[in-house]
Amino acid sequence: MPSSHSSSTSSPLNLIHTRRKEMTATFTSALKRGASFFASTPQHEHEGGFTKAAEATTLFPKVDPTIDGEDCEHDCESCTIKYPNKFKVDEDEKLYGHVNGWATHMLVATGKTDWVRDVSDEKGSVMEAVRDCGVKPSNGVLYLLLILLPNSSYSTKKNSVQKLMLSASNIPLPHPHQSPSAPTTILLLPAFTVIENVTPATVPLLIKHYINTAPTNTTPLPTIPNQPPLTPSPPPTLSPPPPQQNLPFTTHPHPHPHLLLLCSQATRDARCGTSAPLLHREFARHLRARGLYRDLHDTRPGGVGVYFISHVGGHKFAANVLVYRRHRMGGDGDGDGEGGDGREGEMGGASQCIWLARVRPEDCENIVRFTVLQGKVVKPERQLRGGFDRGRGLVSW
């Protein structure tokens, strides 16, 4: 006859309890093994099969005089705009590979070209709400790793990826002279999605239903027929939430396949406030000659939007210029060619962001010809800070 102890341990309730503990231990072990796998992965490997491009010329192709013509290496000769004589920047420090990675980029329409020193300090604004609402973006594998391995090297500033780059912009407000807390417009990158009717009170919904479900800079691009995908799993898309949630936003694709974002924040550094308007004039001149310039109120499809944004870091390397290039599904994947209007083919999100610095007015012509329109860099050793190429699975961080 079995002892009372044996009878107790073999009762159905105890068996269920024991089995539950075993399953919990197995699940926890599996999570730790998965986290250990990611933690042991070299830092140059990222989600979606993306890798770090070790050199500036590896991330984006450099212009080649034998292909692009000898003038690809010459500054614009017709440029009459010059920086002031006292405009000096750091020319010695190495640029490439020192920008923090980011997952998504959110541009907030303010109708202004300069802002308080930290745009999230603007009282009652959407930028302040993004910082203080308590809901943080959670895109990407790093979010899981920081939960499972809070003390790992991934949690250090050096290795962490900035989830959301937040920029104020001069995109016009829906209603001029409105208060900072009134509804405004958001441009979300790399999705190239415009989100309207955003207020500080609705920022948690914006983050939860749009930013957290949006493609990131390391989301593989949608593939075209007969082309193998970068990874076996399909990339996430920015799907509208179920209608029963009655969210207050309206969304639509951004009309322009290319963007030039110029840091213009004089309150952070006078050089940014000086350089941005001068570069804007020169970029506009060369874009107009090709029928590609789009001002802030021009919603015609195609062309290039040129916007002012707030501080992005590295003002000692002014002028900072971010070039976003949109993916054309079923085409060459690089948006417009020379003189194109971007209207052919279904447009996807950004395939590339090319972050340049030390940009001067005489650089603008070739930046338009080769960087904006072809995804090539003219002076990578001197000007390329970083960026990503979703088509080739490369990032600079």
Image: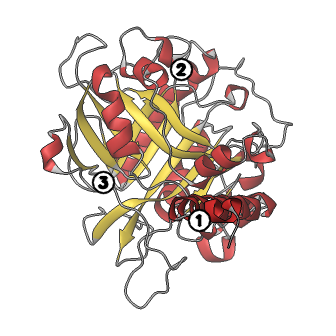
For marks 3 and 1, give the CA distance.
Answer: 70 Å
Q: Residue furthest right?
A: 92
Residue type at numbered disc 2: Gln
Report the residue at 50% width, 11% height from top. Answer: 116
Residue 329 as seen in the image, left or right of residue 363: left
Q: Residues within 10 Å of mark 3 (few under 14, many from 20)?
A: some
Report the residue at 35% width, 56% height from top. Answer: 257
Of residue 153 and residue 151, the one placed in the foreground of this image is 151
Circles 2 and 1, Cβ within 8 Å, touching? The answer is no
211 is higher (above) or lower (below) than 278: below
Q: Where is residue 24? Give x, y as percent.
A: 61, 58
The residue where tag 2 is placed is 265
Q: Where is residue 289? Give x, y as percent.
A: 36, 51
Which quadrant would residue 320 be assigned to in this image? Answer: top right
Report the residue at 47% width, 51% height from top. Answer: 324
Q: Nearer the viewer, mark 3 or mark 2?
A: 2
The residue where tag 1 is placed is 19
The residue where tag 3 is placed is 291
Of residue 161 and residue 347, the one placed in the foreground of this image is 161
Q: Tell which circle, 3 or 1, labels the residue nearer the N-terminal end.
A: 1
Q: Tell which circle, 2 or 1, labels the residue nearer the N-terminal end.
A: 1
- Let me know if residue 62 appears in the view: no
Which quadrant would residue 328 be assigned to in this image? Answer: bottom left
